[in-house]
Image: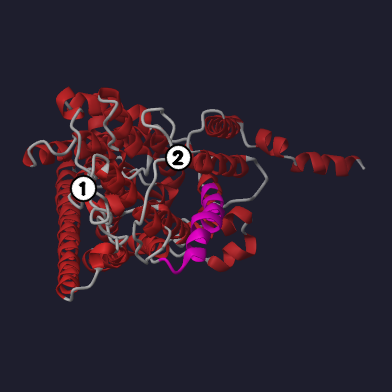
Amino acid sequence: MIESIENFLQSTGIARLIDGGWLPSLQVLVMLVIAGVLVYLAIVKGFEPLLLLPIAVGMLLTNIPGGGMFHLDLFLQPEVDYLEVFRSGGLLDMLYLGVKLGIYPCLIFIGIGAMTDFTPLISNPKSLLIGAGAQLGVFVAFAGALMSGQFTGAEAASIGIIGGADGPTAILVTKTLAPDLLGAIAIAAYSYMALIPLIQPPLMKLLTTKKERCIRMTELRRVSKVEKVVFPLVVTAVVGLIVPDALALVGCLMFGNLLNVCGVTERLSKTVQNGLMNAVTVFLGISVGATASAENFLRGETLLIIALGLVAFCISTVGGLLTAKVMCKLTGGKINPLIGSAGVSAVPMAARVSQKLGQQEDPGNFLLMHAMGPNVAGVIGSAVAAGVLLAFY
Amino acid sequence: MMNQMLYTALTANGGSFADNALEAMNVTVVGMVTIFAVLALLWGIIELLHRVLNAGRDLASDARAGGGASAAQTAQASAAPAAPAAPAGEDGALIAAITAAVAAAMAEEGCTGGFRVVAFRRVSGRGNGRH
């Protein structure tokens, strides 16, 4: 009887925590606190709750000793033994297969494509250039990470893509190039996306004059249904032919959009926008959170990743603003440079920030639809940037 | 301390600082040029597509006009539909704008057929703030 009780006590998470030594135990406790902070930010502060909450729960589950729900070491081998994963893996190992095989980010991109209205971009295709300029942060952060000497080229590329402000893209690149950094990079990417309303406005005010912020842009032209249907097909073909490594993301994004605009697949469009998107978001969030185990997350590199991620975000914002300023000059003042910051692909939050700042200067100025052009261009731009980095490494 | 940090930056990932800087520059230049090239190409294709489709639409409308069809009476949902049907008068622009909005709403709901404005009536007094 006493032996049974002793065996039970030995099997508890508390006993394993104590047996593990003071440093690992402390690390586990720190991770549980971090998971709690993320839960707080998601529920109380409303920071990207749809993803931050599953990430926090995944982090909680993976760090409780003895749970055996996730084994990252199974996936860090050069050749993953999938039979071993199925034989000895836990629930989160099974869910993580969708990340490891690159399935979840692509399915999410189908949903995003179906939810995204590309009309402002088709109506004003010049804004594609702003979306391109706003990828500057990706490469500046990549260069910074590489030259710090702390990261390999593949790891630096994964850190740089945080500047794309696109969670699924960051996850797809990182699971391929640096899976052990996935937790830190995903958390940094989603946290900064949630903080866009705080990060971008100071840079936008710093880099634009009051006169520029007051520019009213002309109304967008109407876009025919034929243009809307042809657009996703053209983008898929062009991007796929030039940067095949970006095809998975861009192809799925455009497929989702085609479902929405073609007018004959309404049921499928609604399914990918709601049921599929929500289910995959849960699986993605919880399995990404699971990668943030104490030994992987609590490293000096994590702080550096978070710092470089912020640099990437800021430089991307600056890149978009400067591109928009140049276009403003070239068009004789027809483009409000505030829409440049929306070139980072956090849809639609970045566009809303442009609208808000524009209206602070001129309450009658409506920039939202104009900013949506660069915003969705940023989604395509970051996917292309991801393709370029995947091609290099 | 600074020397140690510098040494780490120079050697930690196996390459010298110069090698890393060169690699970073290569990837950055190729990456940014590729992104701008791809998106600029898309810009060009979208503009081209718009012009081609518009040219086709202009030809079609010319043909309709030449055939003597009563197309002017039928406001198509796709482009500036209301102007021909709007009666002249001080509220002509307002009526045209409202009719265009109805046409746009119909187009969004998938109604492809045209419509004709036969009559309209003001439902509330001017300037009472209720519409």
Q: Amino acid at mark 1?
A: Ser
The mark total stands at 2
Residue beneath the point at 48% across and 64% down: A266
- Picture coordinates of residue A178, whole percent (x, y): 38, 51
The answer for how far apart the CA atoms under marks 1 and 2 are is 29 Å
Q: The N terminus of chain A lies in which quarter of the figure?
A: top right
Rendered view: A267 above or below B82: below
The chain letter under disc 2 is: A
Q: Quadrant of residue A231?
A: bottom left
Of the pair B33 and B29, the residue shown nearer to us: B33
In the foreground, A150 or A114:
A114
Q: Is residue A284 magenta?
A: yes
- Residue sitting at 60 percent across and 29 percent down? A22
Image point 58% across, 62% down: which residue?
A85
User: Quick one: A300 or A61, which is closer to the camera?
Assistant: A61
- What amino acid is at disc 2? Ile
Q: What residue sits right under mark 2 in the picture?
A: A187
Q: Secondary structure at mark 2?
A: helix
- Tell which of B121 and A164 is nearer to you: B121
Regarding residue A167, the answer to whether it shows in the image is yes
Q: Quadrant of residue B1?
A: top left
Q: Residues within 10 Å of mark 1 (few under 14, many from 20)?
A: many
The label on residue A127 is 1
* Secondary element at image label 1: helix
Please report the bounds of the magenta region as a residue range: A263-285
Q: Name the N-terminal-most of marks 1 and 2.
A: 1
Q: Please identify the residue farthest to the bottom as the structure is shown.
A: B67
